[in-house]
Amino acid sequence: MTQRQNSGQDDELAPDEEAFARRAGEKLRDSSDALDAATLSRLNRARQRALDEMPGQRDLGQRDKGVGWMVPAGVAAAAAIVVVGVWQSDGTPSEGAPATAEQFEDFELLLDDGDLEMIEDLEFFAWLATEDLEAAG
Amino acid sequence: MYCSNNDLTMDYDGLGGAQEDRALNERLAMDRFLADVERRALRIADIAVRNSDDALDIVQDSMIRFVRSYAKKPADEWPPLFFRVLRNRIIDHQRSQTVRNRVFGWFSKSPDTDEPNDPGAMAPDPAMRSPEQQSGLDDAMGALEQAVGELPERQRQAFLLRAMEGLDVAATAAAMGCSDGSVKQHYHRALRSLRATLGDHWS
């Protein structure tokens, strides 16, 4: 705020002129701070649009987007591998044997790509599911 | 008021790399700068063109042009550069409006009277305001806004950049593309004019 505090000092203004300028400046700044939500939203969008035009930001944005789609794709692929492994853990698909409720719960959990921690230890998960299958069979 | 690139640090695990960190920090610094000036920039544009939608377009366009051209400049040079871009954009808009009104007036020449229509009367009212805005003109703030809007262009710029934005004389001169002496002259004249107009409200 240093610049604002200096306003008028280097113009050799008379005290009453300086006081007038200070009051008017404050009024205008206050009015600029009292914008409605819709205008503020439009300003924010305009700013984000401008920021995307910064040199070097486009490359970064593309890289972000690349990582962005790779994460859920990787999670889905890992989940599919685990599910297939669990289903065929006894060598062949068990025809005629309906899947247990626990298996469906595991499947739903694994497909929830928002929960990244669930696939951090795939070996443990596979073992846990195998134990459930053996207990059920 | 304005932040420096050096004030900001961000560790962005996952992407990694000094280049990404630098780009993110630059974006963050620019974001903070623009967020700081955007409302006052909108006020300046609104007073100049007296149309909220046009003013928003001008500010957005100014921000885009500014970051494209000056994002790599040191942050302490940004304020005068940004307001110079804004000033140029406002002038461009006013010129295009003048040409549009002139062309519009020429094409809408009345066939019956053979008298040319007044372009100003045919153009949308530049001061068209909502009821809330109109009622606001009755108070001191409205009177100030109107008086500032009626100042000659250079005086208005000097006043807004000095009194509202708080730029010093040198930065204002850089923003206006003129000398320090010219800024002082325009600022003094603006103050004298405003005090004469607003005496009852502000003395």
Image (spheres, coloured by chain):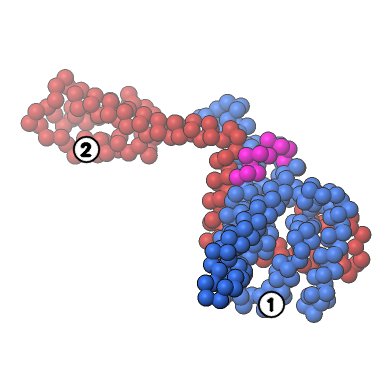
Chain colours: A red, B blue
Q: Residue at x 24, y 39 (%)?
A: A105
Left or right: residue A4 versus residue A137 is right
Is residue B50 visible in this depiction of the protein?
Answer: yes
- Disc on res. A21: none
| Host chain of mark 1 | B
Q: Specify whether disc 1 shares its chain with disc 2.
A: no
Magenta stretch: give its range.
B64-76
Looking at this view, is B93 or B168 the one in front?
B93
Q: Secondary structure at mark 1?
A: loop
Residue B158 belongs to the span the image colors magenta: no
Q: Quarter of the image containing the C terminus of chain A?
A: top left
* Rendered location of residue A56, percent (x, y): 58, 32
Q: Amino acid at mark 2?
A: Phe
Q: Amino acid at mark 1?
A: Asp
Cα distance in 3D space between marks 1 and 2: 68 Å
* Rendered location of residue B150, percent (x, y): 73, 68
Label 2 sits on residue: A104
Label 1 sits on residue: B139
- Tell me if residue A32 comes above or below residue B140 in the rendering: above
